[in-house]
Image: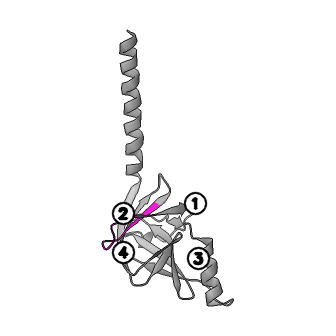
Amino acid sequence: MKNLFSSKTTLAALSLALLSLAAPAVAQTSLTFHAPFAFAAGSQYFAPGEYNLTVDSGRMQLLIDSPTSTATSIVRLAQGGATRPAATADGGMVRFEKLGDRYFLVGVWRNGSVSGDAIAASRKLVESAKAEAGPEAAGSYVDLR
């Protein structure tokens, strides 16, 4: 009897573990874009080129893959992403902020979604870009689909 109880408990624990692994996969969405310029995301720099982004809302992270690299970069997502008009929600979109000559990935919108996910920018990189651009520099946005 004790052995039967132990087997049922083990089976239940394994089932819960498998379900917890499957849940984050549902919250993942991918999109591909071409960046015609170098950019920073989080505290990492990326060269111009094709990128595949995977948003994992369950873990609040963005996975960045490039066909020319074997490594996957992980960038933290921040709470409170911006919204976009429903008329533009027919495809995925990425938003960059330009400070001086540098571009920073600041938002990702999934296909069909009006709510975006914000990228947590490195304060050190942003301050460096502001200092390089001068006190009058104002950020501007660049959207890529």
Q: Given the image, on which type of amino acid does mark 4 rest?
A: Phe
Q: Circle 1 sits in a helix, a strand or a loop, which is it?
A: loop
Q: Residue at x 38, y 50 (%)?
A: 25
Q: Given the image, on which type of amino acid does mark 2 rest?
A: Ser
Give the residue at mark 1.
79
Q: Indicate which disc, 3 or 4, sits on the residue closer to the N terminus.
A: 4
Q: Which residues are magenta?
A: 62-72
Give the residue at mark 2.
30
Q: Given the image, on which type of amino acid does mark 3 rest?
A: Leu
Left or right: where 29 falls relative to 104: left
Q: Nearer the viewer, mark 1 or mark 3?
A: 3
Q: Residue at x 52, y 62 (%)?
A: 77
Q: Identify the image quadrant of residue 29.
A: bottom left
x, y percent for residue 108:
46, 68
Residue 16 colored magenta?
no
Q: CA distance from mark 1 to mark 2?
A: 19 Å
Q: How many marks?
A: 4
x, y percent for residue 84:
49, 71
Pointer 2 and pointer 3: residues touching (CB < 8 Å)? no
Q: Indicate which disc, 1 or 3, sits on the residue closer to the N terminus.
A: 1
Q: Identify the image quadrant of residue 37.
A: bottom left
Neighbours of disc 3 within 10 Å: few (<14), some (14-19), many (20+): some
x, y percent for residue 10:
39, 25
Give the residue at mark 3.
125
Residue 33 - label: 4
Q: Given the image, on which type of amino acid does mark 1 rest?
A: Gln
Q: Circle 3 sits in a helix, a strand or a loop, which is it?
A: helix
Farthest residue toward the top? 1
